[in-house]
Amino acid sequence: MTTPNVTINLRSSSNRVNPQDLSAIGCVFGYSSAGTRNQVATLGNLDACSAYGFGEGIEHAAEIGVQAGWPVYFCPVEGTQQAPSAVTKTPISAGVATLLYGSALAPGAAPPAGGLLYVAKTAGVSVVQVAGGANGVVVTGSVGAQVITITFSGATTNGAIATLVNADVTANLLVTASAVGGSGLPAVLASTSLDNGALTATALSAGVTIAIVYAGSGTALSIPAVVGSAVIINGATDANGLPASTATDIAAYLAANGGAGATAARLLLTLTAGGTGLGLAAAKATTALQFGSTGAATVAGTGTDAYTFKVRVLSSGTIGGSPAPAIEWSPDNGNTYSSRRLVPGTGIVALADNLLTTGITITFTGALEEGDVFTFAVAKPVVASADLLAALDAVIADTSRDFGFVATPTSCSRSLAAQINAKIQAVKTTRGLRCFLNTRGIAEGVPGETRAQWINALIADFDGFESVSGPLWVVAGRFSHISSYTGRTYTLGRPGVFAVAPLNPRAAMCSACSRDQPSPRNAASNCRTVCGGVAFRSLTSSGAGATHPASSPAAVDGTSGWLSSPVGIAHPARPCSGPATHPACTDRVDSRSAAIVETPHDGSSLRPGTTRKPARRFKPSLFQRMPLARVESIEPSAQHGP
């Protein structure tokens, strides 16, 4: 049993003021689960963000405020929250043996042909047919060793005997009788144990089903191609269409047959014959084989954001019973977990805590076993292009607030980016805004898409895209980050324009001139060392031994990491304060190509050297790709290279 624990979430709500000028102040427009749509608001700290619920928009704004300083302006955008996927259970224990009860065939007297088929409903049952005397059914013995004795007269048919047996309350609890091959006359049957035709089936993975079918005349025993995890066994029949496969026949066929169906089925389940194995195997409707506990879960609601849920059972128990089972849940695929939660008698648990409300509830049934895991996902709310553009109109129209850039975490196609660009260009001389957008992520809206296919699709979509004078930039790629707002990791990745943690709120210092270099684009020199909206101090120059102080921030696992990103947006564009030329300083990194990342979304870590020669443009040293026209190509796990 897992020891109970207490999770303490600490979140700073201090109002750290952004120390930079107007160009450092941003306005985010994006989805949030609450707040008046298309109305700009001023956020002065994290507490102010809570009025807007959850979602990629408000989380984006909160992160910029925490990392670059407040205020941050925010405009909520309308969106449609999505329903979760089906739940997948990964049980902690292996398959549980399932007994498939056997049967017995009592051949009829000839002529005519036919017989009585008895199918067991429980173990430990034998059947006897005795000729002579009045028709009757008698059950003797104790549970697990019961005998059904059927007495019949010479003129009674198999159909009449079947009706007699099924009408007997005690016998009907033990077997089902049916006339097969025609309603001929019954014959004497010595005591026959139905257990000799039983099979024990054990699943080797979750979700396996089995069915045994008898059909046609002269049918051979076979296992057809397996679809998914459904195993179907076609039992053999004789010339009269009567079932003919024994339990041993079926078990041996599964274990040794080289056909594709049997080969695939062997990976899903095992079968063991019961008793002597020489009894007739009974037909069986599709039956789910238990794998692990009987606990199951369903989910409901709609998600406030994109989540990959993982729910773990911390202590065993039956829903509604005592002791109650306990769980913990994660919205970021197991990177962070909630505190321990007891499952109430209703089985319903809202996936929410003091930092995050996901909008999803999970309902448990059955008995949960410690170590069982339930997983499912929900896509981020869908934002219509018209709604995003309407919010941007509201942002541009709000002249009561001063800000230098706008950004949205909503994925943009070339068509949408062009529409946004037109609006930004229209106010270029009056507002002077810059705008930062993102393409869709890999497989976003294209299930099964590979990285290569994603790259090619974006290249084709944005081919020739241009924002005159460059007020709008589009970024391709995602990175992972611990949210300052929800305390969770963005395992699905957040857009490249998402602010990342700066080391220092002031500009980096160039050792060649000993002056601050705050400008992301310095026409007078090549010294450009900005990141995340503020300068960082961890680059190494390649020229004449001139170096910037190396103090690369640590990733969450203690390693240093770099990721190309356009988040150098919160930095004033003013001239370099140093000499007109810096011969010894050859760093050529601008605000679109240097940033700090804590960990890639695939769980791996970047491990570059302690010093790196920066690159003017993104260089994919880990992945091969082509930069798009006016689109910075970035990817988790990519790093700057020489």
Image: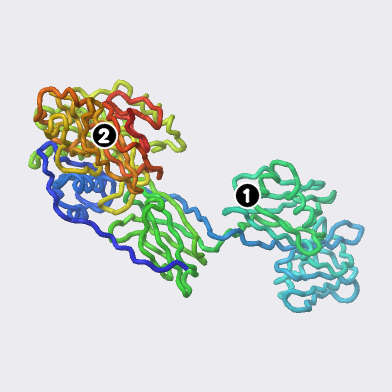
Labelled disc at residue 577:
none
Disc 2 marks which residue? 594
Q: Residues within 10 Å of mark 1 (few under 14, many from 20)?
A: some
Instruction: Answer with left or right where residue 412 lies relative to residue 259.
Output: left
Labelled disc at residue 230:
1
Image spot of residue 276 (x, y percent): 81, 63
Q: Secondary structure at mark 1?
A: strand
Quarter of the image with the C terminus in it: top left
| Closest to the observer, 443 or 46 | 46
| Closest to the observer, 88 or 245 | 88
Dividing the picture into quadrants, the one containing residue 611 is top left
Q: Amino acid type of disc 2?
A: Ala
Q: Amino acid type of disc 1?
A: Ala
Image point (39%, 63%), residue name: 349
| Closest to the observer, 210 or 571 | 571
Instruction: Answer with left or right where residue 127 lies relative to residue 63.
Output: right
| Closest to the observer, 237 or 347 | 347
Q: Are marks 2 and 1 in contact (CB under 8 Å)?
A: no
Image spot of residue 272 (x, y percent): 73, 58
Asked whether residue 387 appears in the rendered view, the answer is: no
Image point (45%, 34%), residue name: 450
Image point (13%, 28%), residue name: 428
